[in-house]
Image (cartoon, rainbow, N blue to C red):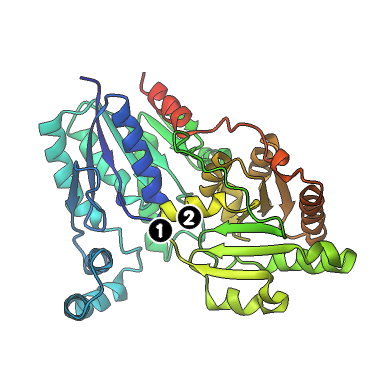
Amino acid sequence: MGERWLVISYFTGVDGMAASIHADMRIKELQSRSVEVQVLSSLAAKNDHGLVQRVISLFPSGIRFEVRHVFRKRKKNAVNILLKSFFILLLFPFYALEKIFLRFDPTWSWYLTASREGRKIVREFNPEIIYSTGGPASAHLVAWAAKKASGAKWIAEFQDPLLHPTTYRSDSERKHFVRIEDAVAQHADAAVYVTEGARKRALDRVSFKGRTAVIYPGADSTRTINTNVPPDNGVIIAHIGTLAGTRNLDAMISGMNLLRERDPDSESLIKVIQYGFTSREVMTGSRSVGDRIVFAGRVPHDEALRRMEDAHVLLLIQNADDVSRETVPSKIYEYFLTGKPILGLVFRNPELTGILRSHGHLAADIEDPSSIASALMKIVKDFKGGKITETAGTEPSITLSSSVDRLMELVR
């Protein structure tokens, strides 16, 4: 029998959610290495792994949030719609009262109930490693409680920046996040970040007693890749994921418009297909390019992987906000494994630009339409010359297996 790990994550088994996909892949990889895993998660999670202990949040906002997730998994029929509406209406007065006094993310109160369960699990399961990953930062408070009740080592992993003006709703929530970061800095054996930018900003704020590390998440390189060749009557550029707010198609459209001025024939060969939720504002803003942008709607995660393989080029778009300086979109790692060329529209993030270019892909400044037009021109030129499949970049050095290797090295 190998090591025993307690994995604490608010989301597991939730299709299409980046935080859940991240945790799910690590659980699967740890199990493949004979690690005995126990998972503590929320009511919003699924028990796909057969080893998930689910705990409901304590406060109304969390209960309401999780009830919505529970009903999302069920068939949409009259009975389930009525049941969901009944629970939401029942909770509403308490939810409204909470929001008057606490402007927090709805997942915040999960740690109040999950901490008790975490202490119980470590007494019974006796793990060597406690691994908290988020997603919602409440997982780290649960892990802190579990560590205090055991002699286990604690790895705290931040998938997103914790303290940033865009990550908290009120000064009270900011103080709550400060408390979480201080707990990790003082008590965790290792703090893991998924970008160097996020790690450096954290080190500017606090001193860590344990180690800090940057581990790029990677993706499952054992998945079979379909080598379908897309149609040759135009360049299909696919974007997978949500488009809303500052992550939109405005920069791409500006680049396409500029390319049309420079070379109308080349621009006419480009078609962009969006798979995933798209806000009404993004759809409205795309009318100027007509049928050159197609909105295919949401698809399940497995289907999204297949859609990647049917494109010539994969499009990566960052949010045009300051937090993007500390983040790398997680879909990039699945993009790498398809063997397709990637066009990244990057917002003030040299780290992401470096990752793309070091793997042989294209990175354009999202604030510079000329750089986007030039990247599109190169794509069309490669397509016309029959060389687009030859520009798919190098074999990815960042995979799920390599990231879990590094994770396990931290505790050895």
* Residue 160's disc number: none
Depicted 298 relative to depicted 35: above or below? below
Circle 2: residue type: Ala
Q: What's the residue at 66%, 33% (across, down)?
A: 394
215 left or right of 21 in image: right
Say which quadrant the C terminus sits in. top left
- Contact, CB < 8 Å: mark 1 with mark 2? yes
Q: Position of residue 284 (x, y in %)?
A: 61, 80
Depicted 34 relative to depicted 41: above or below? above
Q: Position of residue 324 (x, y in %)?
A: 59, 53
11 left or right of 198 in image: left
Of 209 and 220, the residue lying toward us? 220
Label 1 to label 2: alpha-carbon separation: 6 Å
Q: What's the residue at 57%, 38% (across, down)?
A: 196
Give SS at disc 1.
loop
Q: What's the residue at 19%, 75% (across, down)?
A: 80
Mark 2 surroundings within 10 Å by alpha-carbon count, few (fewer than 14), some (14 through 19), many (20 or more)? some
Circle 1: residue type: Pro
Say which quadrant the N terminus sits in. top left
Give SS at disc 2.
helix
* Residue 304's disc number: 2
Of 276 and 268, the residue lying toward us? 268
Q: Position of residue 143 (x, y in %)?
A: 27, 40
Depicted 406 relative to depicted 165: above or below? above
Q: Position of residue 317 (x, y in %)?
A: 62, 57
Of 264 and 332, the residue lying toward us? 264
Q: Quadrant of residue 353?
A: top right
Of 101 and 234, the residue lying toward us? 234
Disc 1 target residue: 300
